[in-house]
Image (cartoon, rainbow, N blue to C red):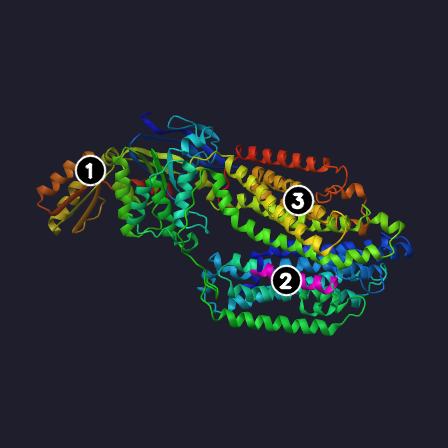
Amino acid sequence: MNLTRLLLRRYRVLIGAWTVLVIALSGATVSGYQTTYRTAEQRRTAVELARHNPASTFLYGRLTGPGTPASMFTWEIGAIVTVLAAVAAVLVAIAVTRAEEDDGMLELLRSCGLGGAAPLRGALAVLVLTAALWTLGCTAAVGVWTGHTDGVTWSGAVAFGAVVGLTFLVVAVLAVALAQVAPSAAGARVLGFTTVGVAFAIRAVADTRGAGRLNWLTPLGLRATVRPFAENRWWVLAVYGAVALALAGLAVALSGRREYGAGLVRRRDRRDTRLIIRSGFGLAERLARRSVIVWTVAVACVGTMFAAMGSAVVQQSRDGDLGGFLASQLGTGDPTAAYFATSGTVIGLTVSTFAVLCVLRNTQEETAGLTAQVLAAGTRRWAPLAWQVVVTALGSAVVLVATGALTALVAPTAIDGPHVAVRAFGYAVGQWPAATALAGWTALLAGLRPRLTWLAWIPLIGSGVLALLGPLLGVPARVRDLGVFQHVPDAAAAHPDLWPLLVLLALAAAAAVLGVAATTRRDLTTG
Amino acid sequence: MADQAIEVEGLVKRFGGLAAVDGLDLSVRTGEVHGFLGSNGAGKSTTVRVLLGLYRATAGRVRVFGLDPAEHAAEVTRRISYVPGEVGLWPNLTGQEVLDALAGLRGTRDQAAERRLADAFALDPRKLVRTYSKGNRQKVVLVAAFAARTDLLVLDEPTSGLDPLMEELFQSCVREAAAAGRTVLLSSHILAEVEELCESVTIIKDGRLVESGRLADMRHLAASAVTARLSQEQAAVVADRLRPLGLAGPGPVGPDLRLSVPRERIPAVLGLLAEVDARDITCTPAKLEDLFLRHYQVAAR
């Protein structure tokens, strides 16, 4: 129990930040679905639009049920919150298990009279407590709207909260089991995110191909199978609870079969490679190479999935009876363009996450004493951050060009319509200015105050919320335009409006230059 | 080449309200091995980071090779090899790749020397850094530092993870570097190591200079240790005659005499011991440890 408290204390910021994000997102949006649509007619139109929008079917699943604010909330926010819960589950689960071991923290604890299985039990207890906290938090945050928002009931809120908590728990325990296999914490994280990706892909196939039964196989389909506010199938929750328990048992069994500090899969720890560089750029590029490859694969998979799954639903929306109000809601009027715009937003979100993480490496290297080594070898003070920004910009470009090229190849085989390949490529690559803008903002923080680099995530999260939730929550377009992801013009248009992208690039360059200049005016951060 | 490789006058470095270094003077002649001593938290590493241009001095004049490191960090560090006390390296590179990277950043390289040193230190450079122990990580940086074509070695507690065999090798590397005309600033709290290697030392405490100079001169100024074995009668006579010199308390002295004697009194004390025919007389010049402890114990009271 003491170990559980120690872990909670050590990771209170990580767990706390995700808890706030998930619960706040759930609680703050429920009533939005009521107030945005004044009349029942308007809401019915929006529901109809959502049912025929291929991109949102791919992202969130099928909007079933009566179309009350509660069911719209479960469909859209439920999908986003459960994906966030799955991502958080991997991060938290690896942090409290393998990362703790790789850091050498656990070695000290285990020498204090703890049994071999105690650390794993402590970590599992942390995950269970977090899941319970999220269940209660989401239940309360949503349940209080009972009577104010149509369709919200306390029992439905409990089911919703349990779906969020259980999604977290199942993915987290699965990640703990994978952490016993992977050779290192970083490897375990990649395995964990791959699993989340597969879980999402299964859910997307289930919803876009009308194979709803597949949803039973994925934790991200839990929301669709439990159906909070509609059927509240409690027994599904019980089944998944049993799955979590079994996975925990598996993790404990696996942990007994491996050495401390090593996974069941051994890593290669000897190689004959050389690193011939002429400046800090070469070093930064070499250090970022692996993560660029991993992110390229991940983002290209997301883009290709979008392209491949779009076929049936784009067709459906074109055949559907979409007139007047609906057509205006689709913006450009062409469903293909709208589809790829949404796909581009998701691609932009993921590549920007890469960009922020990549620039943040500079701060991590600085506090770990690595930058000191680089500077003491005759490097200019501004160079490490500058090279990191350049590598980030180039890495983002690689990710986006690869993704754009692959989707441009796949999309025409799945979707027919005008300029499919051009649009698939354009909407992906067009996110580059957004990614560099967020990288520049991160560089500004890293240059000025390494302690404040957590602020790097704020515009990313804000822009994501505005882009994904803005339309259905009725956020005014002026406010939505403050986000960075929705400025990509239609590449097939006669005169694409490139000004917003140029503004983003100018902001990126200015912020990066200021950040790099700021490093020369402050002490190196150490320890 | 300038006569002084490092010149520091009145260096002050504040972090918020705390002065980590408070008016320090330090001067290191070109070509000498200079010991930099102080307890944990005395300000050694802070000073070293100012010398490398990693920290900017709050006040004072700092010159390395005649340049201000805050303004010309790259020009200065290109001629410096730095070994930090806590060696952090990129965990997903091999030792060889780290050597490649550091040499690549510097732009000049002596691969033959690197290979020779890696062999001597029994370092397997093909292994990933994350599998290295603390000592092995330190070896990577030591190999890079000694093999680089630099004029000044700044070693900040470089041997804290090395075993005695490697410590021996480290000392011969420092001597070799000095013989080749390179300047060495060795920050340490292993006094035997400094005593073995350094011609001059600077002792600092709470960020201030307490003593600096050639080790030989400092030994002269300090008290020497005199020991002898005495019979009971001899002890009584010796105690009586030591008292006027202020070297013995009111009680009798034991059969194993052990005295700390200022330099000017040594002839008198040795004469006295010879006169009473004491056995096993030894006279040892002050050790660095005595110099060091004197400054630290005085303050501790």
The segment highlighted magenta reads A191-208
The mark found on residue A429 in the picture is 3
Horizontally, is A84 left or right of A187 in the view? right
The mark found on residue A198 in the picture is 2
Q: Mark 1 lies on which chain?
A: B
Q: Nearer the viewer, residue A189 or A519?
A: A189
Distance in Å between CA atoms under marks 2 and 1: 89 Å
Q: Which amino acid does label 1 sit on?
A: Leu
Distance in Å between CA atoms under marks 3 and 2: 24 Å
Q: Mark 2 lies on which chain?
A: A
Distance in Å between CA atoms under marks 3 and 1: 90 Å
Question: In front of the other: label 3 or label 2?
Answer: 3
Q: Nearer the viewer, residue A380 or A307?
A: A307
Based on the picture, tell me whether residue A196 belongs to the magenta stretch.
yes
Based on the picture, tell me whether residue B16 belongs to the magenta stretch.
no
Q: What residue type is labelled 2?
A: Val
At which x and y percent is residue A443?
Answer: 59, 39
As helix, strand or loop, the secondary structure at mark 3 comes to: helix
Question: In front of the other: label 2 or label 1?
Answer: 2
Asked whether the viewer can see residue A459, the reply is yes
At which x and y percent is residue A81?
Answer: 71, 58
Question: In front of the other: label 3 or label 1?
Answer: 3
